[in-house]
Amino acid sequence: MNKGTIDFITLGCSKNLVDAERVMRQLEAAGWKCVHDAQDPKGEICVINTCGFIGDAKEESINMILQMAERKKHGKLRKLIVMGCLSERYRAELEAELPEVDAYFGKFDFQGIKDLLGCYPLPGNPRLYPWYERHLTTPKHYAYLKISEGCNRMCSYCAIPLITGRHTSRPKAEILAEVKWLVSQGVKELNVIAQDLSSYGLDLEKRHMLPELIDEMAQIKGVEWIRLHYAYPTDFPEELLDVMSKHANVCKYLDIALQHCTDHMLGLMRRHITQAEQDALIKKIRAKVPGICIRTTLLVGHPGETEEDFEALKTWIKTMRFERMGCFAYSDEEGTYANKHYKDDVPQEVKEARAAELMAIQQEISAELMNKFVGKTERVMIDRKDGDYWIGRTQFDSPEVDCEVLIKHSDERSLVIGDFYNVEITKAEEFDLYGKIIP
């Protein structure tokens, strides 16, 4: 029994995507057809999963709501529902200013969408699916695995704790059950995500449980790659490094946001770590997991950042030579510590110029590091075919954000999306590699 079509539009991060996938699975159990990020939405109901992290993301979410509200105004949409971070943070304001939206749900009550749409088990299906099951919107060979929600760190610039609340870990048994279900659906690569991976388990058993979780995940048959995203440097669970070294299917990859390097800025940002401690951690990670790819994120233009701080940051980047790096300009977010206690004293054009300068430095570093792959053979997972090329990734690259391997299409051999191949790297660019299949 098809009750109709619901268009889901997900904005923001992969953690939002997981939430949308869970709701879609439950709605489909009750007879709805769910379509995700359609190029031309045609459903009579639209659910927008919003982001409220920084200014640009909030603007994108508002514009999408207005676009769908206009569609509803012209009779092309019966019901408009908004969920996610923006409505968690600004629900009262949104309800007052955008009454054309039928219902708002936040980060923690979005299961109410099921009740709103009459989401009950169909005859012959005595129950809905377990909540960890999802309608996977990623290619079937990889998925995101959210192991916790929230953050206790309270960095000066960050609105995440205001949106998601305190850090809450999912039970380990539930996560492992989800992993087994994902593998049964054909998933080979698990991208483990959280606002703060480092704190996993502290609220459950007052100890770091991430190393044992990853250790047990790695032993599940069918798990080919495990990739770790969004660790925090302060109180980092160093036992995790032993697990990464022990298991070949735990990728030599760690996404750990460092934000800055000088003690002055780390103090203003309330990172609870010194440059010496941070540098020592990076040195230990590289020593215990040789060849690891470290991805980090930096923030420039935070209140109080001087030219001296910025020059020190440039020198530090050249010294540390991170394999992957992103950079953001500071966004003054209401309710944060920085918004309440600091003056936003770095002009916007200076923030943007600093971010661009850092990325130019990183581009040169990346080009040098990528050239070291030429002549080597790497295990590559194929993600898709695009024009004349098969597009894949090594263990050092996360989907959608990192480098890719381009393999010239040959009529003599058709590759299988989601399968692994040994690829000889023949050419390197700043952010991409080229290669050929080894027979």
Image (cartoon, rainbow, N blue to C red):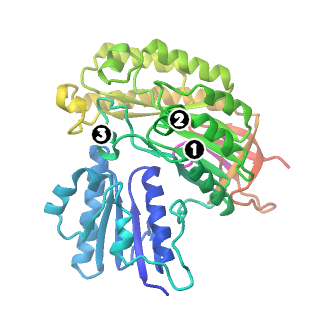
- Give the mark, 1 or 3, whose residue is nearer the N terminus: 3
| Contact (Cβ within 8 Å) of mark 1 with mark 2 | yes
Instruction: Please provide the residue range marked out in magenta.
Output: 394-407
- Give the mark, 1 or 2, whose residue is nearer the N terminus: 2
The residue that mark 2 highlights is 255
247 with respect to 161 (left or right): right
Give the prevailing secondary structure in the magenta stretch.
Answer: loop
Residue 17 picture quarter: bottom left
Circle 3 SS class: loop
The residue that mark 3 highlights is 159
Q: CA distance from mark 3 to mark 2?
A: 20 Å
Residue type of the residue flagged with mark 2 = Asp
Residue 301 picture quarter: top left
Q: CA distance from mark 1 to mark 2?
A: 9 Å
Is any part of residue 241 visible from this angle?
A: yes
Residue type of the residue flagged with mark 1 = Ser
Residue 395 among those drawn in magenta: yes
Q: Nearer the viewer, mark 1 or mark 3?
A: 3
Q: Which mark is residue 10?
A: none
The residue that mark 1 highlights is 398
Q: Nearer the viewer, mark 3 or mark 2?
A: 3
